Image: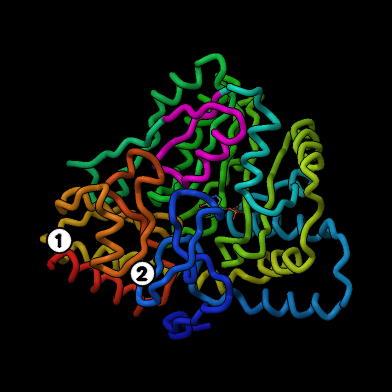
Amino acid sequence: MTSTDLDRLIPRAGTGSVKWEYREGAVGHGSTLVPAEDPDVIPMWVADMDFPCPPVVTEAIRRRAEHPIFGYSVGLASLREAFCDWSAARHGFRPDPDWVVPTEGIVPDLGLLVRTFLEPGQGVILHPPVYFPFFGAVRNNGAQMRLCPLRREDGPGVDGRNPYRLDLERFERLAREPDTRMTFLCTPQNPVGRVWTPGELTAFARIAARHGLIVVADEIHGDLMLDGRRFTPWLSLEHPPGLRSVVASAPSKTFNLAGLKSSCLLIPDEEMRNAFRHARDRTGVYGVNPLSAAAAEAAWRGGGPWLDRVLAYLSENARTLRRFFAERPELKVGTVPVEGTYLAWLDFRRTGIEAGALEDFLLDRARLRLENGAIFGEEGRGFARMNLACPRPLLEEALGRLEAALRG
Ligand SMILES: Cc1ncc(COP(=O)(O)O)c(C=O)c1O
């Protein structure tokens, strides 16, 4: 696959694609979807890619499909090994395969983790702006949200760096409250694109350990490092003794397999792992989809060269977007460097468009469907999240539409 291949838009009509065939009536996760009625709108909201997945994946599905029996499956030991080998080769850290619990989606896992390890009414610290289903995973499972918004270090000294920081002081204050039990960390952070440094992660871990919090580190975007950055897996750090952690990972963002519903949790503590497994059994969810397992294993085993090309292309898309607004300061749209993920965080607060009217402006005037920043938390009002994992000609068309709308 060359960058010319990535430049080509593959129509997704008729595939049931959430991004292309639906629009959301309200913040939710599935139940509020209504069909998109306007095919002219460019959809850049849902976080999947408009690129074909690695050919090794389609080949593995084809090969598995040639065995005509699709009975109950728990996945092979080689699936867990493949994940651990991938992590070792990519990030220099090999988890123990015994820690790996294959699952079918991180969002349902988060809710189940809350139900498994918290008493009703206990607190989970979240760090918005953040992936909005984190809120539901806490609220819909009997726990209380404790909000610890990221700080923005704008102004002198930022020098083109991503300005978002964890608020470690507030984190410690909230962690100290007696009924706070858990925190979710999005690493790297969707939607602001920050890749947390080893120093930031270590400071976070110390606070969590001091106050007995369980850290749930969502690393679903961990492989999506732009411009050659390095990712620090949460479990690769020297953690204080007694710190309890769960890491969520998946091949879905990395290799564009989200519809296959394949993910895994890493739970190093055996007692916690067994508690989660029993809780999962009680939901009636059992095993894994054999086609998805074949796809995941093939991606982790052979998807590296494909990912390298996609990351180079995404890095260039991110630069294209930054350059576009840097060259047009009069549009007053702020951007931050995307360090990780393929999601751009656009700041419209200086454009004069009222936060409450931004989504309609983008849809009606620019003919773009972006994710409304406000769904990621109050701090996201006046922002929008743009998915950059699309052919560059489509991105350029979208930027042109946005410029025309802002000038109009
Ligand atoms: C941080 C984060 N976690 C989880 C998910 C979704 O995970 P899954 O599809 O496995 O439920 C996403 C998707 O955008 C995400 O950004």
Instruction: Pinpoint residue 370: horizontal percent, then vertical percent.
Output: 36, 60
In this rendering, the label closer to the viewer, 1 or 2? 1
Which element is circle 1 on?
A: helix
Image: 239 above or below 350: above
- Percent x, y for residue 306? 56, 74
Looking at the rendered structure, the kind of residue marked 2 is Asn
Within-10-Å neighbours for mark 2: few <14, some 14–19, many 20+: many
| Residue 121, position as x, y percentages in the image | 58, 22
Q: Secondary structure at mark 2?
A: helix
Residue in front for this viewpoint, 127 or 369: 369
Residue lying at 33% horizontally and 39% vertically, measured from the top left? 379
Q: Is mark 2 within 8 Å of ligand 1?
A: no
Q: Which residue does the numbered mark 2 point to in the structure image?
A: 317
Residue at 35% over, 77% down: 40
User: Callout 1 environment at 10 Å: few (<14), some (14 to 19), or many (20+)?
Assistant: some
204 up-or-down from 362: above or below:
above
Magenta residue check for 312:
no
Q: Nearer the viewer, residue 168 or 30?
A: 30
Q: Position of residue 350 (x, y in %)?
A: 16, 50
Which residues are the magenta region?
A: 123-147
Disc 1 target residue: 331
Calculate the distance from the C-alpha at mark 1 to the C-alpha at mark 2.
Answer: 19 Å
The type of residue carrying mark 1 is Leu
